[in-house]
Amino acid sequence: MISRYARPEMTALWSAEARYARWLDVELAACDAMAEEGLVPKEAAAACRARAGSISPADAVRIEEIEKTVKHDVIAFLTFLEERIGPDARWLHLGMTSSDVLDTSLALQLGAAGTLLLAGLDQARAAVKKRAFEHRHTPMIGRSHGIHAEPITFGLKLALWYDELGRARSRLERGLATVRVGKISGAVGTFANVPPQVEARVCARLGLDPAPASSQIVQRDRHAELFSAIALVGASIEKFAVEIRHLQRTEVREAEEPFTAGQKGSSAMPHKRNPILSENLTGLARLLRGYALSALEDVALWHERDISHSSVERVIGPDATVLLDFMLHRFGRLVAELRVYPERMRHNLEATGGLVFSQRALLALARKGVPRQTAYVMVQRNALRALDEGLDFKKLLLGDEELRHHLGEAEIEACFDLQQQLRHVDAIFARVFG
């Protein structure tokens, strides 16, 4: 992923030296486990661990130089370890296949990346919660189909986001748990040369679960679940970003992205303050959906394995986690610094002259015994006239003789009580936030 959309904390997990370090963790854990099972001399396992050291950027370069000749990344890695460790390195990778190393280490990398993703999601969710309580009772118009519907509060909008991010977290946790498995089961998953006890010991050392059954690889429906969960987090962020973009429109202007000192919005128009952060999040979410589709394509492989998934995962593993990490932190800062304009919200709420209380008038008539469709016609004719002629809806209702036959002035006035409309806000907050 290009540095523009990456944080160094996440990209460091996917560097070449970090990848080889995970491979080394798996190889040494396997060697130790085999020594405990009596398959490898204990002194040889100890020598391998003592001489292996850590993987530096220079070591990564050396491994890649070897790969240019052998055309096989794991063989290149093992050749490098032979150079460093000496004859005892022959006990490494005993009875194992490349995917024992690759899939088990991928689980470790995804787990480490997942820790950062969950932390980023928690930070973003905390920012949403703080602003939700700040604007719990800030009234605004709710919209359906882009048209004014009924009053809500800005805090309720954010409470809905918070709740959705909670589901996103649960899905992400489940996806991470699903890929948190390792395998040391050999070329076709039969443990022909390494007993299952070794796999169990290795996974316990590395904090993984053994895959109950595997072929040459851990099955890719697991990874498809995780990348789908990642894409769904991105889809939610896109949903919130699109809403911010709508609220920032000049005609609406109820909320606005932060605009820092010295920032410029347009090369041509000095007055512009564009919702570029939200638009950026919208675009990046599209990439995450593409990565999820790629992961789904990886599920169907030939027989016990082919490598058509390998090239895909070299891209989507780093890119999807790096992008989502970036998106979560960008979204969290965006919410924390979002400019909110309660006066503008109130202005837009009142822009239709009370039309947003039409349902309350309908229900008041129904409670008086007026058939619902008759009541609907009475209210609608006044609502449409108010809308088309720019008149005050309440005044029209007060002047409607047929309607006044059923509702008195005080009863009509009560239909326009904003506090009554929003009386359950605190109850909703209690359900969402506990």
Image (cartoon, grey):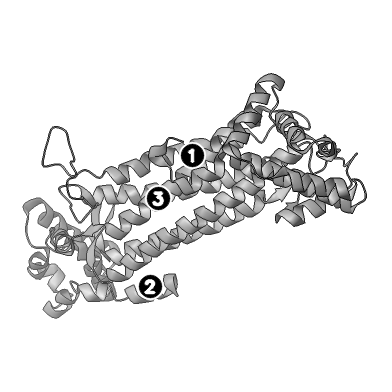
Q: In the picture provided, is 427 more to the left or to the right than 311?
A: left
Residue pictured at 13% horizontal, 73% vertical? 404
Instruction: Please state the horizontal and vertical placement of residue 230, each as a whole percent of the image.
Output: 52, 47
Residue pictured at 43% horizontal, 46% vertical? 7
Give the labeled residue for mark 2: 429
Is 310 located above or below residue 147 in the figure?
above
* Label 3 – label 2 distance at C-alpha: 21 Å
Q: Earlier in the sequence, mark 2 or mark 1?
A: 1
Q: In the picture provided, is 66 more to the left or to the right than 48?
A: left
Question: Could one spot residue 302 in this view of the protein?
Answer: yes
**Which secondary structure lies at badge 2?**
helix
* Label 1 – label 3 distance at C-alpha: 12 Å
Q: Earlier in the sequence, mark 3 or mark 2?
A: 3
**What number is the disc on residue 289?**
1
Instruction: Please state the horizontal and vertical placement of residue 303, each as a whole percent of the image.
Output: 78, 30
Relative depth, front residue between 20 and 155: 20
Q: Residue furthest right?
A: 38
Q: In the picture provided, is 52 more to the left or to the right than 281?
A: right
Query: Which callout, 3 or 2, points to the residue nearer the camera?
Result: 3
Query: Which callout, 2 or 1, points to the residue nearer the camera?
Result: 1
Relative depth, front residue between 243 and 325: 325
Instruction: Please state the horizontal and vertical placement of residue 168, each as a whole percent of the image.
Output: 50, 55
Is 208 located above or below residue 411 in the figure?
above
Q: Amino acid at mark 2?
A: Phe
* Label 2 – label 1 distance at C-alpha: 31 Å
**What number is the disc on residue 237?**
3
Q: Amino acid at mark 3?
A: Ile
Q: Are marks 1 and 3 in contact (CB under 8 Å)?
A: no
